[in-house]
Amino acid sequence: MNTLDHLVYMTDQIARNFGTLDRDAAAEATAEHILLFWDPRMKSRIIGHVADGAGAGLSEVAALAITMVAQKTQPSAAATEA
Amino acid sequence: MTYQPQKDFGTPASKASDIVTLSIDGRDVSVPVGTSVMRAAAEIDNNIPKLCATDNVKSFGSCRLCLIEIEGRKGTPASCTTPAEDGMVVKTQTPHLQRLRKGVMELYISDHPLDCLTCSANNDCELQDQAANVGLRDVRYGYEGANHLGEAKDTSNPYFDFDPSKCIACSRCVRACDEVQGTFALTMDGRGFASKISAGLPTDDFLSSECVSCGACVEACPTATLQEKAVAEIGKPDRTEITTCAYCGVGCTFRAEMRGEQLVRMVPWKDGKANRGHSCVKGRFAWGYANHQDRITKPMIRESIDQPWREVSWDEALGYAASEIKRIQSKYGRPGVGVNPLRGQNNVQGACDMGSFPHELSGYRHVSDATTRALFEEDWGVPIDSEPGLRIPNMLDAAVDGEFKALYVQGEDILQSDPNTKHVSAGLAAMECVIVHDLFLNETANYAHIFLPGSTFLEKNGTFTNAERRIQLVNKVMAPVNGMEDWEVTQALAHAMGLDWNYSHPSEIMDEIARLTPTFAGVSFARLKEAGSLQWPVNEAAPDGSPIMHVDGFVRGKGQFVVTDYVPTDEKTGPRFPLLLTTGRILSHYNVGAQTRRTANSAWHPEDLLEMHPTDAENRGLNDGDWTRLSSRSGETTLRLTVTERVAPGVVYTTFHHPATQANVVTTDFSDWATNCPEYKVTAVQVAASNGPTDWQEDYEELSEQSRRIETAEAAE
């Protein structure tokens, strides 16, 4: 798996873990985990993946979570992408 | 401290709270109900002669040496099996008792070699001590009769010998094996004069028996019958130092028993709160790696990994490391840094407590917490990033992408221990600067540019925190052969980077931890020394530590239960890979085996073996001992097969202790979603007969040989 595939895979798994919650709550919980535990480069990469296209490979909840991450990520953090 | 054996109270302590008071030789002593008269006497340093009693095991009453007289009672009961009672009046030394004891000793000595001066237990032998204590001067029976003096030694165990000619059949070893270790490997074979300690079946020796070599029997033996080979070779230790074992998270404490700077033996410390006088084969015996010929004691550098290593001074190595770090920082910036703890190690708890995570500061405080960041920023005078860093698997992904450039690995061998070896090696090969700080040229060092020699746990001061949050001191017992303790290496590197760090002892680092971490507020080296150990949180609310956390509630109040969905593995068996591989560890080796493979522990496990159920073996036409090829979607390796019912049909098992096998070539990089913890227990594999090592194994061995070349410094230097 390359890095992007790995990030998509991990996001889907996190969302799946919160499968017992409703859509919005699951997306929020997924977003919170990513915000707290992913480094800025990983975050901006997955945000870019969703922004560029439809976020291929991501489940509905996972894709929604990434849009939430994008909203909450300060531009300065995203800008550290080399 | 000069050499003193640990005090032996003869029988275990009673946990009762009610107290009884009795008189022993005219002195009153108060002890908990259930205490033996022997122990009560020992509490006031009245050491009643004994041979079969020791305080790690229950009393047995067989040697008849610890006899006493009790006012108002007939006979001479054994003090080890007689409970102390209120108002009891005991005499431990009378002419009658003296005669009885002398008679007993005379019989023991009539069947015991009189080679005290050349005996390995000379001056550290309870039989010798008791012969002196009872005033034995003569053996009237002579030595011509039937005896056990010609019995052959069993030297099969690599760490201790069993010499039945010196055995007094007290059963202490048998009882230690049963009660302390719980293995039941030893037994008393035969009766009366034919009584003999036996390990396993009559055809077994110690090595082939069920014995796990924990050493509890050796510690229990009152004579030279079961004794460390090291004592026989070196002699009796003359000083001791308490320290903490460097292997697993149990955190056993030991008495390092020394002669000068030479370690003679490691004896589990009875006052150790994690292990209470017991340990396993690794901590007890497997410390010889500290002086192994493979140990690297000089710093080394090279520009690229196809070059041989070049030995250099500390100054040159640290200067080179600092300039490389600065070069890479100025070229690429600092995105994507991260600190990760050594997983599965003895101090993993301590490393995690110290914020050795990509997203935390000490005391489990998230980097996004501005108040905590401000605390450190003020103390350290540097800004702290509010964003998490990378975990090891993410670092390696980023390295393969060309976005992660440098790694400093201390005391861990990720190439051997982490899953999907080819991915790890590709990640390492893509980095511009890999610094390995270790005792040996490990597998990761094959991809390193700078090697900083490390110090063993015997050579440094500090603390380890075990899995029950118990902070324990590690005390230096010998000078570091590499010249510096590991924390001094870190400080020297900081100096080379232009930082003005001035710690003179690890206790000052602990003071800083206490200052900046609320859960450690009450911890200091002085407090640890005084208390023996402390379980954090140690603060105003819990000055003596916290054996149990969350007693009345959690920080948030009531505990919150969360329903989570089951996220099953995506690793699936199928026609090509029908078996499931589980990898793990065995008792005698520790993780990648860098330490234990360099000790006699290899006697138990010289190579990684693939365990397979007889049905699976039969289906594949494989027999016990065959060379087999183990393959998965990630890679393949070869190793020998053990056919055993220990594993279920459909499952195969192996260990990852040996670099020649490289079990992790086979494992995948699937990991759990929350922590990226690798999935070592589920890999779909196939096993087939093999007639030689795989291409990877051959290539890797050649790479290792090339990579470990060391150009020694010119003789003129």
Image (cartoon, rainbow, N blue to C red):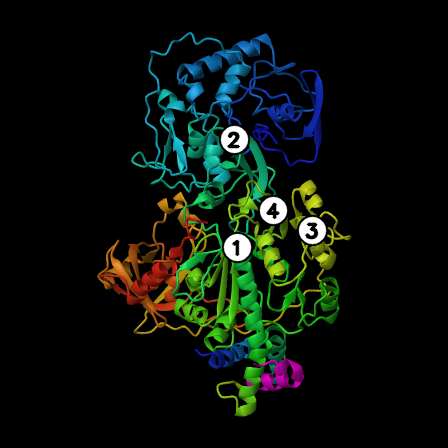
Q: Which residue is mark 4?
A: B461
Q: Nearer the viewer, mark 1 or mark 4?
A: 4
Vertical arrangement, residue B322 with respect to residue B508, above or below: below
Which residue in the protein does label 3 denote?
Answer: B508
Q: What residue is pinned by disc 1? A: B345
Q: Are marks 3 and 2 in contact (CB under 8 Å)?
A: no
- Specify the quadrant of the image occupied by residue B153: top left
Earlier-in-chain disc, 3 versus 2 = 2
The magenta stretch spans which residues?
A: A60-82
Q: Chain of mark 2?
A: B
Q: Is residue B402 visible?
A: yes
Judging from the image, mark 1 belongs to the subunit labelled: B
Where is mark 2, residue-wise? Answer: B237
The image quarter containing residue B229 is top left
Q: Amino acid at mark 4?
A: Asn
Which quarter of the rendering shows the N terminus of chain A?
Answer: bottom left
